[in-house]
Amino acid sequence: MKKTTLALFVGCFLLTAASAEQSFFGTYEGTGRACSGSLSIREKSVEWRSAFSSCHTARYEALEKNIDGDSKRIVLHLKKKNRECRYPVIEMEQAGHYNWNVTGYPSLEGYRNRKSLDWSNSPLPERQTLSCPMVGPQ
């Protein structure tokens, strides 16, 4: 009886974790000139193409994830990036039902230091981010 209960609990946990990831799956469209393009998140890969960066389809790891309440949030890190990909760390935060704030960071270090004034106000190219309002998923 205890093994059955444990198996049921583990199964429910895995289904909940899988559905949490799925809530971000889909294609998001950028708005505005600098953010024109799309961001596509699938079960095992992500692709983000914008006017200033072109991250081809790559596997990712989720660094952070919050699906509680109305404000969903996820941070993805591309495991391997191509040369044209300037932002291999992607932070998405829900701003409305179909509205998202998406920020690209040039590195894990840039993401981790995002709240530091030295980084957020720096003119250095390796510290610059791309912030895009997007709509989706579609």
Image (spheres, grey):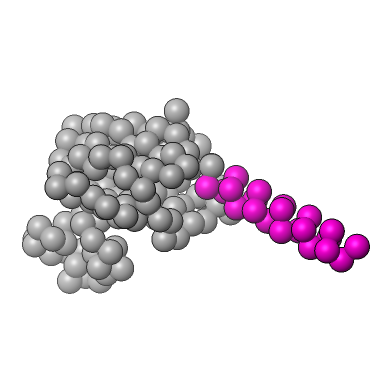
Q: Residue 61 appears at what percent x and percent y?
A: 40, 55
Task: Say whether residue 134 is left or right of residue 10.
Answer: left
Q: Residue at x 84, y 59 (%)?
A: 4
Specify the farthest residue to the right. Answer: 1
Which quadrant, please, contains the C terminus? top left
Q: Nearer the viewer, residue 79 or 3?
A: 3
Q: Quadrant of residue 3?
A: bottom right
Q: Does the magenta portion include 13? A: yes
Task: Say whether residue 40 is left or right of residue 4.
Answer: left
Q: Residue 94 appears at what percent x and percent y?
A: 45, 45
Can residue 100 be seen here? no
Task: Say whether residue 17 is left or right of residue 52.
Answer: right
Q: Nearer the viewer, residue 86 or 102?
A: 86
Magenta range: 1-21
Task: Say whether residue 15 is left or right of residue 41.
Answer: right
Q: Residue 32 appears at what percent x and percent y?
A: 23, 32
Q: Quadrant of residue 55?
A: top left
Q: Nearer the viewer, residue 23 or 99?
A: 23
Which quadrant, please, contains the N terminus? bottom right
In the rendered view, would you say 120 is above or below 58? below
Looking at the magenta stretch, what is its main secondary structure?
A: helix
Q: Does the magenta portion include 77? A: no
Q: Nearer the viewer, residue 107 or 119?
A: 107
